[in-house]
Image: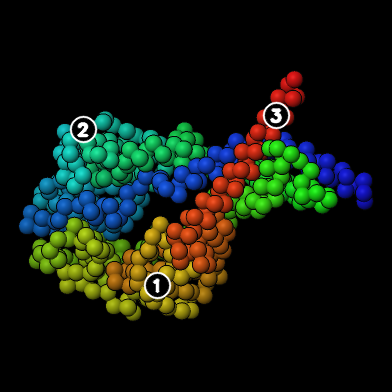
Amino acid sequence: MARWGKSLKRWLHLGHRWLGIGTGLLFVAWFASGLVMLVVGFPSLTEAERRAASAPLDLESVRVTPQEALERAGAARFPARLTLAMRGAEPAYWITGLDGRRQALSAATGDAVPVLTAEGAVALAATHPAAHRVTDLGTVTRDQWTVTARYDPLRPFRRVALGDAAGTELYLSAATGEVALDTTRTERVWNWVGAVTHWIYLTPLRARPGLWQDVVLWVSGIALAAGVSGYLLGFVRLMRDRLTPYRGWAAWHHLAGVAGGLVVVTFVLSGWLSMNPRGWFGPRSPDAAMRAAYAGQAAPVFPAGPGDLARAPAGSVALDFTWIGGRPLVVATGREGAAPCCGTALAPDTLVAAAGAMLPGAALRSATRLEAPDAYWYDRHGAPRLPVLRLAFDDPAATWFHLDPETGAILGRTDRSGRANRWLFDALHTLDAGPLAQHPALRLTAIGALSALGLIVSTSGVVLGWRRLRRRRA
């Protein structure tokens, strides 16, 4: 047994040394970039930003009804989304097909909007509230900030600079003129040492989702082995009669590793799990079949005339036309949020029945109206949308749907595996659980302190690894 124990410690030591040398700089990059991400997130266009940048609807210029827009678009089925909003100075219908394809038609003439030129992009961007001196920056198909597949239906883009103090740039779909993304100078600069580094988000790699996932899983898996072996080795060393047998950088690495090794292992493990290896965790949104069942209406029709649209609240920036449980609904979006309008309304029974259609054969187990966040309805970046209706079903996956009780919008889908992932990632990687979840400033402080401890462990390990390599070369 003693011989086996000695051999195990030797291999543990060698494994940690060489795995650490191979992944040490990655640990430093991950912890340093994680600190940057606490302050600067990856560029995105939020719904609040979209609403704030949208002009109020000019309903007097609307000459085309939603039904006529669907006919002009040649829709064979009711689309995934049908929205009336401004396109520059003209109202337009924005249509998202079930396959994700985007179309835009003038609400004044019913004609498809022209492909966006440089002059057209400048004119559209000039209506943005932050516009100062708009400049066209040319055409972009895919770049660092539009690398993911969710932008595919909108490609290519015309990129324009607003000339404001923040250095804001907009990405406008060349096909429709839709604003797909906005970025600021601060986001673009800091994300190179933030999210791009942390997620290994280089454009040539991230443009191939399968390859990117494999690379991240393998790299973080090897790093996890380095962290686990070091954590175990640190406790083996503590069994001696002194706190640490080392001096200098080795002592820093040993003591910080014992104190923060669990942090290192936890952060890397939860990050590895966030890649959803082998599809262990269920989807977070309904699939196309579920959405079709929820709508309860497949035909490309919508019964709303000019008089109905004129009843929209003043200041509305968008009208969404949708079906829920076979009933038409018009939702008006203003600066503060969205609500049904134009003589349509959503009965609670209709909402529950429509949700049940997404899971044929499953029975509703509970319906809960949440007026405050809880462990499974939360937002790490601020207050989640409230109130929200949680419907729990007794299907084999124990599915929950979160719905907006006013508009009927499906806000999320989660099953048993997704709720487990909530603790395996959010609780472990972002500390979004317990008392810390109720105090964002305290949570960010705790993440910063633990990341700093991880930086001490990883930086000291890099120094020791460099010295080892230099000795071998000598």
Residue 467, horizontal then vertical, whole percent = 70, 29
Mark 2 or 3, nearer chain start:
2
Q: Quadrant of the C terminus?
A: top right
What's the residue at 49%, 46% (across, down)? 35
What's the residue at 20%, 72% (across, down)? 344
Question: Where on the picture, by quarter, is residue 304?
Answer: bottom left
Q: Secondary structure at mark 2?
A: strand
Label 2 sits on residue: 135
**366 relative to 154, above or below:** below
Q: How many marks?
A: 3
Disc 3 and disc 1 in contact, CB within 8 angstroms: no
**446 relative to 163, above or below:** below
Disc 2 and disc 3 in contact, CB within 8 angstroms: no
Q: Amino acid at mark 2?
A: Thr
Specify few, some or many for label 1: CA neighbours under 10 Å numbering under 14, 14-19, or 20 or more. few
Q: Secondary structure at mark 1?
A: loop
Which of 239 and 417 lies nearest the eye of the viewer? 239
Residue 372 is tagged as 1
Residue 467 is tagged as 3
